[in-house]
Amino acid sequence: MPRILTLISFFLISVSVNGQYFVEARVMYNTFNMQDMKAMQEELFDEFPFETKATSSFDPYAGFQFSIGTIFENTNSAWRTGLIFGYTSTGGRVGYSDYSGVVRGDQLLNLVSFGIVGGIERTFNDTKWTVGFDIPLTYDLTNFTLKNELVIDGYPPEIQQYEFKSEAISVQPRIDVFRNFSNNISVGLSAGYHLSILNPDLVWKEDGQSTLTLQDSDEPLKAQWNGFRAGLIFRYSFTL
């Protein structure tokens, strides 16, 4: 709670000294490192007594971000700062099926992020184009579901499910290019990279301390969200 109050206080101070505000939505295309999760998926192949295949392996996936803040203008350049919220997900599946039934192993991850963002931007060509650079600093909450399911014709399904979580700190430096259609409405493109600077282990939700490891390693597994980020931006600017 103190961390959240600090972020809110920072935002309230920033918006109180300037009358130019913005609301922004981003639809993102995200890639993910997920080396630990891919290694775990490979290990699942060996646990089944028959040949399985991966129907998905932590593939790139869509996400979204919302931010609200204030802009400090200075001729053609401006500083901006505000609050940011984001969500994305990915996952893997190992499976096998034949005439007698189906066996599946799912690894599902989702990421909820919130924090602060600050950056600088410059407007060119009679305010039609704006180029900016900013760095969100976010507190990341990961939820990881490990689910195994066995379905045999004529028998009740057998399901094993375990829930894990982790909390991390990340930065996401990015470059934005906007086309300004009016003083209020802008549409743009964004490219950046998500980098976890503090990334603790995944822990079992039930006891808050048990971790996941591979059979031949004592190193706990992590959710590695690092990867390229690209997006389409919609911004609305206004003055109170």
Image (cartoon, grey):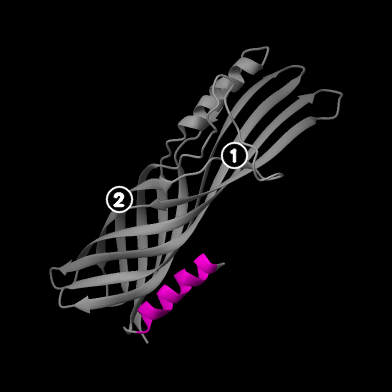
Q: Residue at x 30, y 70 (%)?
A: 80
Residue 8 is covered by the magenta coloring: yes
Q: Quadrant of the C terminus?
A: bottom left
Which region shows up in magenta? 2-16
Q: Amino acid under label 2?
A: Ala
Residue 126 at x, y = what percent?
A: 14, 73
In the image, 149: left or right of 230?
A: right
In the image, 44: left or right of 176?
A: right
From this view, report whether residue 45 is shown above or below residue 115.
above
Looking at this view, name the residue that lies furthest to the left: 125
Quarter of the figure with residue 239: bottom left
For label 2, the SS is: strand
Mark 1 is surrounded, within 10 Å at the Cα level, by few (under 14), some (14 to 19) or many (20 or more) other residues, namely some
Find residue 191 and name its label: 2
Q: Quadrant of the N terminus?
A: bottom right
From this view, report whether residue 196 is shown above or below residue 34.
below
In the image, 28: left or right of 208?
A: left
Q: Amino acid under label 1?
A: Leu
Residue 79 at x, y = what percent?
A: 25, 71
From this view, report whether residue 100 is shown above or below residue 105.
above
Residue 216 at x, y = what percent?
A: 55, 19
Find residue 75 and name its label: none
Q: Residue at x 34, y 70 (%)?
A: 81
